[in-house]
Amino acid sequence: MNMKKLIMTALVALLALPVFAQSDKEPLYTSSNGQFTFDLFDHMGFGYNAVKSADFKPAFSCDFFMNMVKAGLFPVQNLGLELGVDFEFNSFSSNESAFMQTSDGIIKAASFPVFDLYGSFDKKRSNFSVFALSAPVLVKGIFDKVEIGVGAVASWNFTGTTSYYLRTEKTDLNYTERKAKVNPFSYGILATVSYDEFGVFFKYYPKSSHLLPEGSVDLSFMTVGIAISL
């Protein structure tokens, strides 16, 4: 699925879900004393990645995630810890650089003009994407329908892809390469605010979180987005 289709699918899903969402949604399980909660597929989110890099000029980049498991432990009424596991997809784009992989999978950014050696190309967006399972851990306060959480997120990054698209009058080149090299683990900080079934979130992954191995494109990013209960 290309980036445009992915973005459209995510937006349609987010717009359609309120129609099917139930008000006053309860967790799948709540202990008798209300101190422990457990739920499956609790929420999903879509965000914008604001990218900082010394190696390429970013274009529109996005984050999409689907919660798989969520558990809460509230030893104090309306205050406690919340843990989860999410499937997460992050895409990073550029209109001026082509992301390519070296023979060992390292992601590099090549200037599009290098392709002028082969003719006059219409350069389209290039991107690299990272697929991961993330584990957010939040200190969460609940005030009626308002929930505020602050904490950290650790990610297991299991695969990456790179792609670019070029066009001439005679031919189109749509190049995608899988198995881009990503570090297995990265980390960031996370903050969330929600009301009823809707929320906003903020994540920040510093360069020191090592999403990509040494020698790859320089990268740090922060994400702002919306989340909705399922």
Image (cartoon, helix red, strand yellow):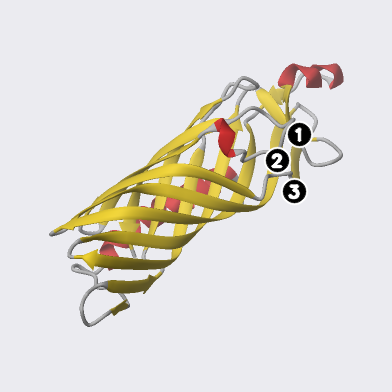
Picture coordinates of residue 96, whole percent (x, y): 64, 21
Q: Are marks 1 and 2 in contact (CB under 8 Å)?
A: yes
Compared with 192, 223 (above or below) is above
Label 1 environment density (alpha carbons within 10 Å; few <14, some 14–19, many ≥20): many
Compared with 114, 214 (above or below) is below
Question: Residue furthest toward the bottom?
Answer: 32
Towards the viewer: 67 or 57: 67
Label 2 environment density (alpha carbons within 10 Å; few <14, some 14–19, many ≥20): many
Q: Are marks 3 and 2 in contact (CB under 8 Å)?
A: no
Residue type, label 3: Arg
The residue tagged 3 is 178
Residue type, label 2: Thr
The residue tagged 1 is 100
Label 3, label 2: how far apart the Cα atoms are: 6 Å
- Relative to 78, is 43 on the left or the right? right
Picture coordinates of residue 174, whole percent (x, y): 73, 39
- Relative to 102, is 47 on the left or the right? left
Residue type, label 1: Met
